[in-house]
Image (cartoon, rainbow, N blue to C red):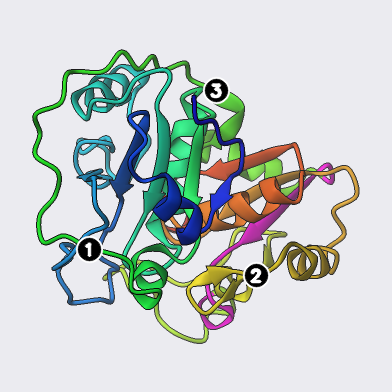
């Protein structure tokens, strides 16, 4: 059986293993608030199934976007995609590495480890002139036996973030751009005020990327070494819990262990804090 323990796989690796029966390829593309383009791609990597992050895999009744779904919802929708306990999942998006990291973190949060982000996503796949298809895989698969086991340590929420922000055993890293972090530009979400979580520090997710791909492990080590991490627990935040997961991906690759994503991130905090 094909087995992959890496958090990140290359397009070359995926190309070589695309025909494996256990492999499930997921397109996790979503639309940025500031982006008017369609969420749909005109072409896909072969065998792609669409992972509806904003719809089927979020709590759509929640006040804030992309809110963590229940374990029951995640399990039901993952099974509907034909995902099994022994599946090997590779997730990508059309931005390179953007929303794919959120999906990777969701699977981790619900107890599934055999999942990887495609380094460079669809742009890197196309750059190497690998085959693309013009339609998603037909939904003729059997329902899967995926089992969701919620790992509460992977996520934190508004009821604890204020306490965390004053605890010296934690370090909050904000993945938004430096201009947004410093309130030099307006937030892209209409009506959301600018600002930062107290005592948080800025690590723009774009600093971790080299073009569409993640920077080398050595470069990532250098970037993270600029922060006073020591043995602190790392909390990752952003606008709405999407790009914070790119920081979580890099930190996991660097083998930091105490990692948490603030699910509501600045959209929630900036709205609810008084």
Task: Give 272 or 263, whichever is nearer the viewer.
Answer: 263
Magenta-highlighted residues = 168-180
Q: Nearer the viewer, mark 3 or mark 2?
A: 2
Q: Secondary structure at mark 2?
A: loop
Magenta-span inclusion, residue 171: yes
Mark yes or no: residue 268 visible.
no
- Left or right of 130? Residue 107 is right
Task: Give 169 or 245, whichever is nearer the viewer.
Answer: 245
Measured in 3D between alpha carbons, the distance from the residue under mark 1 to the one under mark 3, in whole angstroms, is: 35 Å
N-term mark: 3 or 2: 3
Q: Which residue is mark 2?
A: 215
| Residue 261 x/y as whole percent | 56, 44
| Residue 17 x/y as whole percent | 42, 44
| Residue 272 x/y as whole percent | 42, 49
Q: Which mark is residue 151?
A: 3
Measured in 3D between alpha carbons, the distance from the residue under mark 3 to the one under mark 2, in whole angstroms, is: 28 Å
């Amino acid at each position: 059986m094909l087995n992959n323990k890496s958090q990140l796989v290359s397009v070359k690796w995926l190309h070589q293993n695309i025909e494996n029966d256990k492999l499930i390829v997921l397109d996790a593309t979503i639309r940025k608030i500031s982006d008017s383009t369609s969420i749909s791609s005109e072409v896909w990597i072969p065998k792609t199934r669409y992972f509806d992050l904003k719809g089927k895999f979020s709590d759509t009744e929640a006040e804030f976007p992309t809110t963590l779904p229940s374990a029951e919802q995640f399990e039901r929708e993952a099974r509907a995609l034909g995902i099994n306990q022994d599946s090997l999942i590779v997730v990508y998006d059309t931005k390179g590495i953007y929303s794919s990291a959120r999906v990777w973190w969701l699977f981790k949060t619900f107890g599934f480890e055999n999942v990887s982000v495609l380094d460079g996503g669809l742009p890197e796949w196309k750059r190497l002139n690998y085959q693309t298809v013009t339609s998603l895989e037909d939904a003729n698969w059997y329902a899967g036996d995926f089992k969701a086991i919620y790992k509460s340590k992977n996520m934190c929420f508004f009821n604890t973030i204020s306490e965390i922000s004053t605890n010296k055993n934690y370090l909050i890293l904000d993945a938004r751009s430096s201009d947004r972090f410093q309130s030099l530009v307006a937030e892209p979400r209409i009506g959301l005020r600018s600002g930062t979580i107290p005592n948080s520090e800025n690590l723009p997710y774009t600093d971790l990327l080299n073009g569409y791909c993640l920077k080398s492990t050595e470069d990532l080590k250098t970037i993270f070494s600029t922060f006073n991490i020591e043995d602190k627990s790392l909390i990752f935040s952003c606008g709405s819990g999407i790009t914070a997961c790119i920081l979580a991906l890099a930190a996991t690759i660097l083998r930091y262990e105490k990692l948490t994503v603030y699910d509501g991130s600045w959209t929630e905090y900036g709205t609810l804090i008084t």
